[in-house]
Amino acid sequence: MKILIAGSESILARDLMPVLKENNEIMPLSKQKMDITQKDSAIKNIKTNAPDIVINCAAYTKVDTAEEEREKAFQVNGIGVQNLAIACEEMQIPLCHISTDYVFDGRKNKPYTPFDEPNPLSVYGESKLAGERYIQWIMNRFYIVRTSGLYGMGNNNFVMTILRLAKERHSVKVVTDQICSPTSAANLSAGIKKLIESGSFGIYHIADDSGSGISWLDYAREIVSIAGVRAEIIPVTSGESPRPAKRPAYSVLDTGITRLAIGYTPEKREVALKKFLSTALHRPAEQ
Ligand SMILES: NC(=O)c1ccc[n+]([C@@H]2O[C@H](COP(=O)([O-])OP(=O)(O)OC[C@H]3O[C@@H](n4cnc5c(N)ncnc54)[C@H](OP(=O)(O)O)[C@@H]3O)[C@@H](O)[C@H]2O)c1
């Protein structure tokens, strides 16, 4: 397949492209080459490259800043996705789009299935839901993939941030009352590959297997323990450590339907984390 990747410089795309490259032709487009908020540019790029499918990794992902930049968040995560959906529909090709557990309000207290009703608590979550809705209003053939707590190459993720803070400060405060299902970009990439080869269009959840979920606190403790870093991880509540954007208290993703539809069995979180750290800790520091 010829696969066009929008947002080719994202954390996800950096893991996804090598996975897809094995038996596909990849056309990576960075924000500089294709700003998805520019409708004419999006349509022109997709027409000129004539891919068999577009995967959208481009997004506005600054969850807290979005509270003050509502329009910017909606411009990228809503209108930008609408533009891609229009272009793909015109070309009669599917779009694979990545969304988030933050479309849910966290009140369910059981893992969320794709059939649960979204009710975002933050501007970021609302804007991501807008993108999902545009795709469903415009397109016939699409994959929407919701994931959670993504980490991958580079230093801009929870795993590497905890390790950096643990080394710098020897004690780190982490919230204990938000439960999620962290996911390695390598595993998400493998799931996306399986999904786009399946033709089983729809909304899917792909996350590593954390059972009924893990708190960010326990996850941070797991990270320092596996990395062999001595640091105190101190529990705080969301109330004690307020952030501009509200997060769901419980946003574990149920991957059961993904397993039934495409045979994707998620890897255990601890196994994925160990694999990631075994290479990440030996990689030269990024500039
Ligand atoms: N990270 C997580 O924990 C997490 C969790 C759940 C779901 N997700 C979803 O997973 C997907 C990938 O996330 P990620 O963490 O890999 O994202 P990321 O690293 O923040 O990358 C997003 C990319 O999109 C680019 N971008 C922003 N505006 C754009 C525009 N108008 N046109 C084209 N590109 C644009 C950004 O470029 P600039 O940096 O130059 O602006 C950046 O390279 C996103 O859809 C995100 O919502 C992420």
Image (cartoon, rainbow, N blue to C red):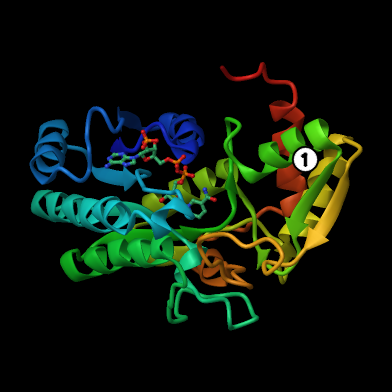
Residue 164 position in % (x across, y down): 73, 33
Closest to the observer, 263 or 215: 215
Q: Judge left or right: residue 227 versus residue 204.
A: right
Residue that label 1 marks: 274
Q: Is residue 65 visible?
A: yes
x then y, percent, for residue 146: 46, 61
Determine which quarter of the picture holds residue 127.
bottom left
Mark 1 closeness class: few <14, some 14–19, many ≥20 residues within 10 Å: some
Q: Is residue 103 above or below residue 77?
A: below
Q: Is residue 200 visible?
A: no
- The residue drawn where x is 89% and y is 35% is 228
Left or right of 59, for residue 79: left
Q: What residue do we see at 45% from left, 49% from top? A: 62
Please identify the quadrant where the N terminus is shown: top left
Q: Total number of numbered labels?
A: 1
SS assignment at label 1: helix
Q: Quadrant of the C terminus?
A: top right
Q: Quadrant of ligand 1?
A: top left
Q: Height in image: 18 above or below 261?
A: above
Q: At which x and y percent is residue 260?
A: 53, 69
| Residue depicted at x 58% and y 82% | 107
| Amino acid carrying mark 1 in the image | Lys
Q: What percent of the width, then of the height, locates residue 13? A: 44, 36
Residue at x 53% of width, y 67% of height: 246
